[in-house]
Amino acid sequence: MRDSPNPSAAVLITQVHLYGEGDLVDVLVDDGQVADIGAGLSAEDASVIDGRGGILLPGFVDLHTHLREPGREDTETIATGSAAAALGGYTAVFAMANTDPVADSALITDHVWRRGQEIGLVDVHPVGAVTVGLKGKQLAELGAMASGEARVRMFSDDGLCVEDPLIMRRALEYARGLGVLIAQHAEEPRLTVGAVAHEGAAAAKLGLTGWPRAAEESIVARDALLARDAGYRVHICHASTAGTAELVKWAKSQGIQITAEVTPHHLMLDDSRLETYDAVNKVNPPLRENSDVSALRRALAEGVIDCVATDHAPHAAQDKCCEFAAARPGMLGLQTALSIVIDVMVKPGLLSWRDVARVMSERPAQIVGLPDQGRPIAVGEPANLVMVDPDVEWIVRGDDFVSISDNTPFEGLTLPGQVRMTMLRGRVTAQEGKVNPL
Ligand SMILES: NC(=O)N[C@@H](CC(=O)O)C(=O)O
Ligand SMILES: [Zn+2]
Ligand SMILES: [Zn+2]
């Protein structure tokens, strides 16, 4: 575990419900750790944060984010993405490798890690590419990235699928030797040539080329079998169909080591959104049908899908405000993820607050093997925390986000729940909507 660069002063968080449960308590944080928990605590030198009955959870861990640095700093940087993460309640994010240049060497992955630490708002863990240049032909130097300063623990060609089954098989075998995670963007490219939207009635009516469910599900099934034979784990990025949930359930029932994430947008939106031809709704995998949305919610509630990951994908206005087919896929997620989860999962009773801690913090930390994140809120544990006011409602305005880009599909929506404070190793990184840089 890494030490905090400047161990912070003591902080007393008063009047919070741990995991939204039980009586109100105070939590004393000192030297980067939870030092005491109880009613009516006092501490001479501590700064006090009035919890006002808020909910205290372990800081969120995002297994899937795009920060666009290096290469597209006009759309997001490690600094602005870190700020968005802290404001969203995150204490660790995994930055995907599809940058320019691609993060397929320790030179790049170490740079991303160091830059994240300099900014100090969230631990930015670089994801290494599985193949050189994301080209799918030759394995990247996974070992060199894993043993670099960033200690890369997750590899993915996200944006593209590791399409060749032999390369995927080799990747899993190497990953097993290194103890790292392979995360697959499941898309059989021969089935998605020219595809821009979910293959269904909505796309047919609008004349948009369809991305069939089978393009995702065939890779999920294949990779489950490859993981079985490798005797090693595989992680499925952004599950988007009912069939993917069924396949993951089946694979788990066979003892196959498979895990899966779902995005907030796939938990809330469906392809009825396409009608406006507004490319803010264009994303990979595409928004599916209402029946898929329901199945994904159920699968997350039941633990078939392990966690929520944002797939935060900033894009410039000129890459979004254009013809639907020409627009880039992807949408912002870091600053809306919690509120969407509250709206579609907590409010209808599908998840408790303790479950929110599980799907947004504990499971992702376990899946990727982060020892200091997703820990219980208990004395002696690292103080990576988020405090939430579940009752406040707010209106989404892309312009208000700290991200450089503003491509949110939730523009104008009233959402519940606000992050009041985020803390990384005892240091407040965001409070009442403001970030607190080092
Ligand atoms: N999700 C997306 O639609 N886009 C992602 C790539 C990806 O996650 O596949 C991006 O990098 O913009
Ligand atoms: Zn992807
Ligand atoms: Zn992605």
Image (cartoon, rainbow, N blue to C red):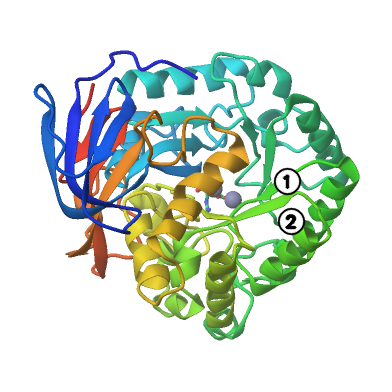
- The residue shown at (70%, 33%) is 130
For the residue marked with disc 1, what is the amino acid? Val
Classify mark 2 as within 8 Å of ligand 1 or not, answering yes or no.
no
Query: Could you tell me if residue 315 is visible in this image?
Result: yes
248 displayed left or right of 379: right
Q: Nearer the viewer, mark 2 or mark 1?
A: 1
132 displayed left or right of 359: right
> In the image shown, does 283 or 155 lie closer to the viewer?
155
Residue at the outermost left position:
44
Residue 291 lies, with reference to residue 329, above or below; the image says: below
Residue 59 lies, with reference to residue 357, above or below; the image says: above
Q: Which residue is mark 2?
A: 189
Query: Could you tell me if residue 190 is visible in this image?
Result: no
- The residue shown at (24%, 48%) is 401
The quarter holding residue 411 reads: bottom left
Q: Residues within 10 Å of mark 2 (few under 14, many from 20)?
A: some
Image quadrant holding the C terminus, namely top left
Whole-angstrom CA distance, mark 2 to mark 1, is: 19 Å
- Whichever of labels 2 and 1 marks the residue nearer the N terminus, that label is 2
Residue 261 lies, with reference to residue 108, above or below; the image says: below
The quarter holding residue 170 reads: top right
User: Considering the numbered disc 2 on the image, is that residue within a helix, a strand or a loop?
Assistant: helix
- The residue shown at (27%, 38%) is 37
For the residue marked with disc 2, what is the amino acid? Pro
Question: Can you give x and y, in whole percent of width and height, for residue 135 in the image?
Answer: 72, 36
Question: Can you give x and y, in whole percent of width and height, for residue 174 in the image?
Answer: 81, 29
The numbered mark at residue 234 is 1
- The residue shown at (42%, 57%) is 354
> In the image shown, does 233 or 98 lie closer to the viewer?
233
The numbered mark at residue 103 is none
226 displayed left or right of 381: right
